[in-house]
Image (tube, rainbow, N blue to C red):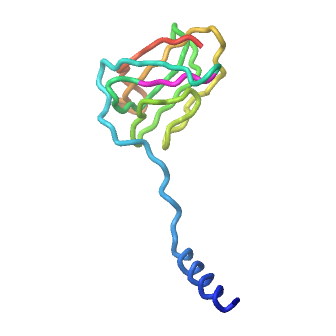
Amino acid sequence: MSRQILPWVLAVSVACEGATAPPRAQSPRLVTCVAPVVLLTERIGAGGEPRFNWSPPCGATYLEVSTPDHQTSFWIIQGDTGKIAPGVTYGVAPPDYSARYGPLPLVSGARYVVRLGVMIDENSYAVVGEGAFQR
């Protein structure tokens, strides 16, 4: 019986030898957002983190959550590969994006603003949509 198993084990070993790692997840290819974009915020479950959607479903390169006066940022994500697709949960950066700042904990009952933008260059962006929500 061991003679029957051995060829199968060798075949698996040979097949795995040349295998490569699965490709890294990337943001979807979307048309770049152009103002005006309507932002919608929803809650995921009781006490869950906010989830941000927008219409039309387009790609952005910058998302920021801040106080209504824009003086304090709580979370900023941006990237230069791919685009951020609608359906972003607070604190969870999309594939091939990373948080430039935060996320900081949101305070229950406090009001916040989320801004969606498109990068113009390394240091600036154009806001294409903005919306408010309460934690």
In depth, the one of 46 and 110 nearer the eye is 46
In depth, the one of 80 and 49 nearer the eye is 49
Residue reaching furthest to the right:
2
Which image quadrant: the C terminus? top right
Q: Residue at x 57, y 33 (%)?
A: 92
Above or below, comparing residue 22 to residue 19 in the picture: above
Above or below, comparing residue 3 to residue 83 in the picture: below
Q: Position of residue 68 (x, y in %)?
A: 52, 8
Above or below, comparing residue 103 to residue 12 in the picture: above
Which image quadrant: the N terminus? bottom right
- Characterize the magenta stretch by its predominant secondary structure: strand
Q: Which residues are magenta?
A: 48-53
Above or below, comparing residue 18 to residue 21 in the picture: below
Q: Residue at x 43, y 18 (%)?
A: 40
Magenta span has 67?
no
Q: Position of residue 49 (x, y in %)?
A: 60, 24
Q: Residue at x 49, y 53 (%)?
A: 24
Residue reaching furthest to the bottom:
3
